[in-house]
Image (cartoon, grey):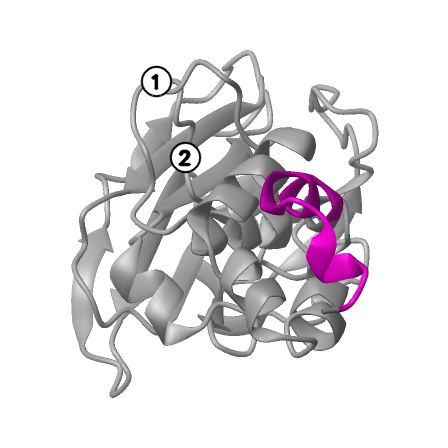
Amino acid sequence: MSDMNRIPEGVLLEILSAVPAPELIRCCRPVCSLWRDIIDSPALWKLKCQYDGFTSNRLKRNPTDWRMFYFLHRQKRNLLKNPSAAEDFKYWDKTKDGGDEWKVEVLPGEHGQPFPDAVVKEYFVTSYQLCLKSQTINLKEEGYPDEFMDVLQPDIVIKDWYAARHDCGCKYQILVRLLSQNKTVMKEFQPKPVIIEQWSAAQWSQIEYTFRDYGPGVRYIYFEHGGRDIQFWAGWYGIRVTNSSVTIDPGDLSK
């Protein structure tokens, strides 16, 4: 028996839980059957969740799989690329480009207000006919295996910011779809368009929606938003959008 195998399992559990997750799977798990069993145990991944701050000791529920829960937290990030126009229209598909077409402007913009987060420097702005832009997120390519989405069905959180110019009325709209492997629509979020009248305060507003209990089979997320001005003025007087996000969130187990 090796010296490592003489260590009590409880102590070995503590030692292995301090190892970074990629090394645990790639280097430690193949060492021996004892290490494999410990690394495969829910106890180890629960400890890692606590050490990394993904959960607390005040649990009101347990996830279906602690290992999946851990990796979902590790992966958590905005899945939309170029959400705040820092790279012009890179990664976006202009599905509608009406009027004088989409444009990128610098905050706060003419007759506009500062954005709540000073890190955000630009926004996308629409024209006098409908302007829509979209991204389709491939979950597997973004590091979310089918098993993770099907077993845990983590929350899919949608957030978007929009604002009007003070001197022009405009319309904002958003459409988000959860799609299967063959792009069949499984769930959809499409609220009524928001109409902002002329001489508004031009404040930035956030819309938020969470998909829950959507069932197994989600493989893509389609995100589309935009709008237009409602006074048909040439130029870029329509709705402004920025800092959009789509996040996979495994949730807070203390709630």
Q: Quadrant of residue 89?
A: bottom right
Q: Residue at x 68, y 47 (%)?
A: 12
From what the image shows, is residue 255 above or below residue 233? above
From what the image shows, is residue 132 above or below residue 189? below
Contact? badges 1 and 2 (CB < 8 Å)? yes
Labelled disc at residue 255: 1
Q: Residue at x 58, y 19 (%)?
A: 202
The verdict on residue 4 being magenta is yes
Residue with the mark numbered 2: 251
Helix, strand or loop for disc 1: loop
From what the image shows, is residue 167 above or below residue 28? above
Labelled disc at residue 240: none
Q: Which residues are magenta?
A: 2-15
Between residue 174 and residue 69, name the one nearer to us. 69
Q: Residues within 10 Å of mark 2 (few under 14, many from 20)?
A: some
The verdict on residue 75 being magenta is no
Horizontal and vertical percent position of residue 81: 66, 62
Helix, strand or loop for disc 2: loop
